[in-house]
Each structure stands twice: as C-alpha cells, then as structure tokens.
Amino acid sequence: MAFDDSLVKDVLKHADIVKVISAYLPVIRKGKDYLAKCPFHDDTNPSMHISPELQIFKCFVCGTSGNAIGFVIKYEHLSFKEAVKKVAEICDYHDPRLDDIHQTKVVDPKRGPLVKCLHDLTVYYQYALNSPEGKTGLDYFNSRHLDADLRSKFLLGYAFKDGKALGYAFKDGKATIRFLEEKGHSLKTIEDAGLASSTTGTYTDRNAGRVIFPIIDANGDLC
C-alpha cells in the first residue's frame, strides 16, 4: 500500500503533542507551554519546550525538535509508519487506514545469532575500555572530548590484545574469541559477524588493540 500523506495530516490534526510526550516523560506546565527533561542528551534541567499551540517540541540545548511523530521516531527508534500508528494509539485516534500499517521487516533466521554475538562483543569491548589495558583507548576518547555519557550512548569500546583483565592469558586478540565461545557463539557465527580472521588456523580478533565505534542502524540495532 502506498502511504497516504493525508493520513499523516489527520493523525497530527487529532494528536496532542503534550499527551504523546507525557506517555514517555514527566512534563511540567510553564505558562502556555510545557517543559520536560530532554531524553536526547544528558539533561539535568528541563530544557525541552513543548508547545500545544504549535504542536511541536524543541530542546534549546541539543537542538532536537519536531512534531509528535518525530518525537516517537527518535525516542522509540521506530519507522515513520510505525510512529504514525503509535501516535494515533496514544491519542485514541481511530482510522481504518491505520490497520493497513504493518511492520514489514523480513526476519533473516541467520541474523539472530549474529545480533546476539555483536551484542555480547559490544559489552566486552565496553568493559575492556575501562580496564587497565584500555587506558590507551580511554585517553584517545578523552582527547576527542568524548565523555562517559557519549561513550555510553554510542557504545564506544576497546578491543583487548591479551585479555588479562578477564583472567585470560592470550595474545593478539585470541582472548576475544575465547570470550565469545564461552558465551556460546560458534566460530562460524564469530567469523560471519566479520570479527575473526585466521591465517594460520588460529582465530584472532582483527580489532585487537583498537578503539571501537560500533555501527548502529536507524532502529538502534548493531550491524
């Protein structure tokens, strides 16, 4: 089905942006507008302004702004169509055209093990960054003004060379392979994830000794 632009207009016409954002965040009234702590940066004071009159939100610190649909896309990492349907649900707006909006993402049975492997790997890299061996990577990130909040938000890490911090006694990235195998991942999955390389029959982490910038898709999934 071609997406009906008039449906978007109708949903936004019946949407209450305060109600939508209130479904996710505490909001407080200030005059004719509302305030909330911005979820898109490390906000300590309410810096997100919500205008019922204009039906928009804007953070005056990080600059994030948009309408109700845009907020749901950013907050829940949904597709545009899914966000339209979600806004309609929150605002109790019913339209038969909404029933035709479905998530059409094709699930590849091979993807599950790869995603799980990448998740475990990312946690491993984050741990390594905060270990004695990871100090080199930590110093690099600090030199780039990437503080702890940004490192956590973007899942930044470091790849062990020897893994002594985990009790391993390996060199040249073999600790990573042992860790993933102990987590139940097969060598094939590790190799298919693009991690392992073997030139002599021994698998090693091709990222060993490097800082890690994971790639995350629009839905927030590692890829």
Image: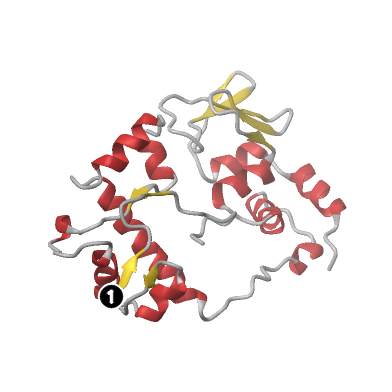
21 vs 192: above or below: above
Q: Quadrant of the N terminus?
A: bottom right
Q: Give the class, few, some or many, for how many residues have Cα within 10 Å of label 1's Cα (few <14, many ≥20).
A: some
Residue at 85% over, 64% down: 2
**Residue nearest the observer in this picture, 78 or 185:** 185
Number of numbered markers: 1
**Residue nearest the observer in this picture, 80 or 190:** 190
Residue 192 screen position, x and y as percent: 46, 75
Residue at 35% over, 36% down: 140
**Residue nearest the observer in this picture, 79 or 132:** 132
Give the farthest residue toward the front. Answer: 200
Residue 122 screen position, x and y as percent: 37, 57
Left or right? Give the position of 64 relative to 191: right
95 vs 59: above or below: below
Residue position marked by numbered label 1 in the rendering: 181
Left or right? Give the position of 51 relative to 163: right
Left or right? Give the position of 13 relative to 222: right
96 vs 36: above or below: below
Quarter of the figure with residue 204 = bottom left
Residue at 51% over, 37% down: 40
* Disc 1 element: helix
Residue 139 screen position, x and y as percent: 30, 35
Colouring method of the image? secondary structure
What amino acid type is highlighted by mark number 1?
Glu
Residue 21 screen position, x and y as percent: 58, 40
